Amino acid sequence: MYRILQKRDLTPVTKLFVVDAPMVTKHVEPGHFVIVRADEEGERIPLTVADYDRDEGTISIVVQEVGKTSAMINRMEEGEAFSDFVGPLGVPAPLPESGRVVCIGGGFGIAPIYPIAKHLFECEDVEMTSIIGAREANLLIMEEEMQAVSEDLRVATDDGSKGHHGFVTDVLQQMIDAGEEIDEIIAIGPMPMMRATAEVTRPYGLKTWVSVDPIMVDGTGMCGACRVTVNDELKFACVDGPFFDAHTIDFEESTRRVKMYEKEEAQAYEQFKKSPQCRCGGANNG
C-alpha cells in the first residue's frame, strides 16, 4: 500500500499528493509516469510524476478532477493509501545539456513540466525560460515552484486575469518575433495546446517535444490502447513515449482517440457526483 503523506489544494479541483513510494523513487527521472489505483475496485489511471525526493522516498502527483476516478482520488485524505502505485513507467523526457530551453506548461500540464524545468535549471549550461498558463488566474498552479526553477517565468491566462491576455502560444510567438534565441522547447498540456505549439514552431524548425497522453490501460505496451502515429509509424505512448517530436505526431488522430469515450466518461462522472459510493460506470473515466 502506498500511503498519502501530504495533501495540498492547488485549485478547487486540483490536488497535490505526496506519496510514500520508495521503490518508485529509486529509478524515477523527469518525464516518467506512474499508474495509480485508488482501491481494489478502482480504475487504473496514468499520472505524470510532478516531483520526487529520493532521500525521503516520496513521489508527488497532481490530480485534476475531470471525471469519476480523479474525483475519487481527490477525496482521499492524508493517511489513506493507494491500492496500486506502479512505476516509473515510460521513457524519461529528452533533456538537453546546453542552450536556451523554453518549458511550456498549460493548465494541468504545469505539474509534469515542473520536474523537467527543475532538472534543467540545475544544469550549468542551460538557460531556463518557462511559460505557464491557465484559463484564469485561480486555476493557475505551481507558479511559485516554477518561478524558483526559471531564470525567466512568463504567465498567460485566457481571460487576462493574470499576465498575458491570451494563450501560452501567443507568448512563445512573441518571443520568436522578438528574435529571442531559443534552442529547444518542451511543452506539456491539453492536446490543442500542444498541437498549437507545434504549429507555432514548425515554420522555424525549432526542436519541440510534447508529452502525449492518449487513453491508457496497462502502461506496459500490452493492451495497445495508447497507440499514436508518429512519422507515419505506429507507436505506443506508454513504452515509446510519452515524449515525441511534436512535428511528427498525427495530432488529428490523437485528438479523436482522446475523445472516444467522452460520453461514457461524462455519464460516469455525473452518476458518481450524485452517489459518491457508486462504483458503476464506463472505462477510462479519469
Image (cartoon, rainbow, N blue to C red):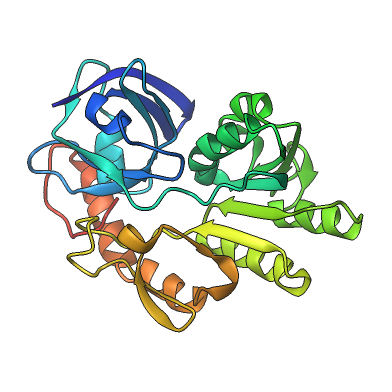
Please tell me whether residue 250 is drawn above or below residue 201 in the rendered image: below
Left or right, 30 with respect to 17, comes to right
Going 51% across and 73% down the picture, which residue do you hit? 249
Going 38% across and 52% down the picture, which residue do you hit? 91
- Tell which of 26 and 265 is nearer to you: 26
Q: Residue furthest left?
A: 40
Task: Answer with the quarter of the image where residue 261 lies.
Answer: bottom left
Please tell me whether residue 64 is drawn above or below residue 122 in the rendered image: below
Query: Is residue 134 at all visible to an observer of this figure?
Result: no
Q: Position of residue 63 (x, y in %)?
A: 38, 38
Please tell me whether residue 9 is drawn above or below residue 37 in the rendered image: above
Query: Is residue 253 at all visible to an observer of this figure?
Result: yes
Left or right, 165 with respect to 31, comes to right
Q: Position of residue 57 (x, y in %)?
A: 30, 20
Going 59% across and 25% down the picture, which residue do you hit? 145
Q: Position of residue 12 (x, y in %)?
A: 46, 31
- Tell which of 93 and 194 is nearer to you: 93
Q: How many marks?
A: 0
Q: Quadrant of the N terminus?
A: top left
Left or right, 96 with respect to 53, comes to right
Task: Answer with the quarter of the image where residue 148 lies.
Answer: top right
Going 76% across and 74% down the picture, which residue do you hit? 203
Q: Residue furthest bottom?
A: 232
